[in-house]
Amino acid sequence: MRYGKIYLIFFKQYLKRLMEYRVDFLIGMFAFMLNQAAGLLFLYVIFQNISNLAGFSIDQILLMYGLSLIPKGIDHLFFDNLWLLPRIVRQGTMDRYLLRPVNPLYTFLIERFQPDAFGEIILGSALVITTATRMDLSLSVWNVLAVLLFIGMGIFLFTALKLITSSTSFWLKNSYPLMQITYNISDFTKYPLSIFPKLIQGLMTFVIPFALVSYYPGLYVFGRISFFEVFSYLTIVLFVLMSLGLFVWQKGLKHYESAGS
Amino acid sequence: MQMFIYRGTIWLWLLVDVYQFVMMIFLWKSVYQFNDTISGFSFNQMLIYFLATNLFFIFTDLETVWAMAEEIKEGRISLYMVKPISYKMRLVFEVFGRAIGILVLLLPIVLATGVVITIVFDIVYTITLWDILISILFIPLITLLMFEFAFFFGTLVIYTNNEFGLVIFMSVFIRIVSGQLIPIALYPAFLQNIILYVPFQYISYPPLILLGKIGDSSALIGLAILFLWVIVFKIINHFMYRFSVKKMVVFGG
């Protein structure tokens, strides 16, 4: 309850700032949309020359892509502050969060609300809706709920990965490249996993499991694998990554050495 | 020199570049399952194209925007402006310094990757010394063009706070219109027509020259046009900067 109240206060402050700098918001949203549009352009150009990629049509691939954009965008919307962790550790301003009578991770996470992410969320939803209607999928309410559940779990998958990589900054001081790399690799989720060799497939399923937010839910929608297969993969991987993330964060906080004076 | 402080980081970056390139190979391999050539590019040529483009992309550095954003926001820019070397000149030298630094690191990796794919995919090259010479001539001009472009956006930081959005925007834009995303020849016609009118297509000229896709005479013409564009950008920036600096407010002494 108390946590919810704090969130509201932070959020109100944030909205005030947003209204102050409206153009900034538009630039950001537009930039992220264009970024994704570039990826779509690439797919479009490729599909001018081929009719299917490893047995998937363009609509199917776009659906998977859209499915991965939504959790990515929501994570970006709420938990973007993790990108700033390396800088905060280096400058020693982490002290601020440690002194507050609330969980430091919580206050740290809610400090920034990133509306740039609407670019991704809108585009992702649009892709899913248009491709799903074009393909004439016969989905039951149960199917839709399952997909929503996968998206919900996907959000925390992105957050957990970011938490793990950014928390290394307590030791490395600059974990930014590590985060950037993980982020870059997520770009490859647009393509069906089956075009890659087994080693990379395994990597994308269990280690940097971006395939769990696009490829597998996609297969589920097309009726090629069962709900429980996707759900069990997601639960196991999410549980491991979340625990690892919280563990690294806790260890990191103990190791945190502030700055100067 | 700054980048050599965190040496571990560099290795990580290189590793990921190689990893991404390998992913790329598999992607194209499955695309080429149905066609032998796409818009005149064979599979082997496509690989060389992307490898070479990666190398030449070193010279399209956008650090300048970050540097300017930081200096403008913190007001440090005023310290640089009173120094006896012009603010812009200093930034240009930083860009060239960075490019050379990265080149030293990346060139061996690219060459090694090149050798590996040459052996694996049995590639035959037909590159003349003349091609290489012209390609090298493009480098300083591409660097300057990109610098002027970045400087323009850097000046815009005076008006906005979201330099992050700006940089994402520019880098995506450049990736699309320069042919780093995918060779321009593969684009639909209407997009090609637009790209014809902006100078960034010349960024992918060197790889295309090396592949023998662009003849000597059109390469030289491209070089001349690129040169003119650099001057045009310089003039725009000159006025833009003079105008904007007056608008800038720096707090404190």
Image (tube, coloured by chain):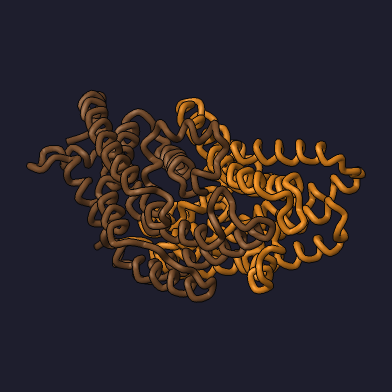
Chain colours: A orange, B brown
| Location of residue A213 by image quarter | bottom right
Please report the residue visible at 47 percent of the width from the left and 31 percent of the height from the top.
B194
Could you say where residue A192 lies in the image, as x and y percent from the top left? 70, 57
| Location of residue A117 by image quarter | top right
Residue A123 versus residue A254 in the image, above or below: above
Q: Nearer the viewer, residue B235 or A97?
A: B235
Q: How many marks?
A: 0
Quadrant containing the N terminus of chain A in the rendered view: top right
Could you say where residue A125 lies in the image, as x and y percent from the top left? 71, 38
Could you say where residue A128 lies in the image, as x and y percent from the top left? 74, 41
For this view, does B45 lie left or right of residue B251? right
Could you say where residue B223 lies in the image, as x and y percent from the top left? 28, 43
| Location of residue B102 by image quarter | bottom left
Residue B129 versus residue A133 in the image, above or below: below
Q: Nearer the viewer, residue B57 or B15?
A: B57
Answer whether residue B178 is visible to the viewer in this image: yes
For this view, does B134 lie left or right of residue B179? left
Quadrant containing the C terminus of chain A in the rendered view: bottom left
Q: Nearer the viewer, residue B58 or A212?
A: B58
For this view, does A104 lie left or right of residue B9? right
Answer whether residue B249 is visible to the viewer in this image: no
Please report the residue visible at 30 percent of the width from the left and 40 percent of the height from the top.
B221
Please report the residue visible at 42 percent of the width from the left and 36 percent of the height from the top.
B162
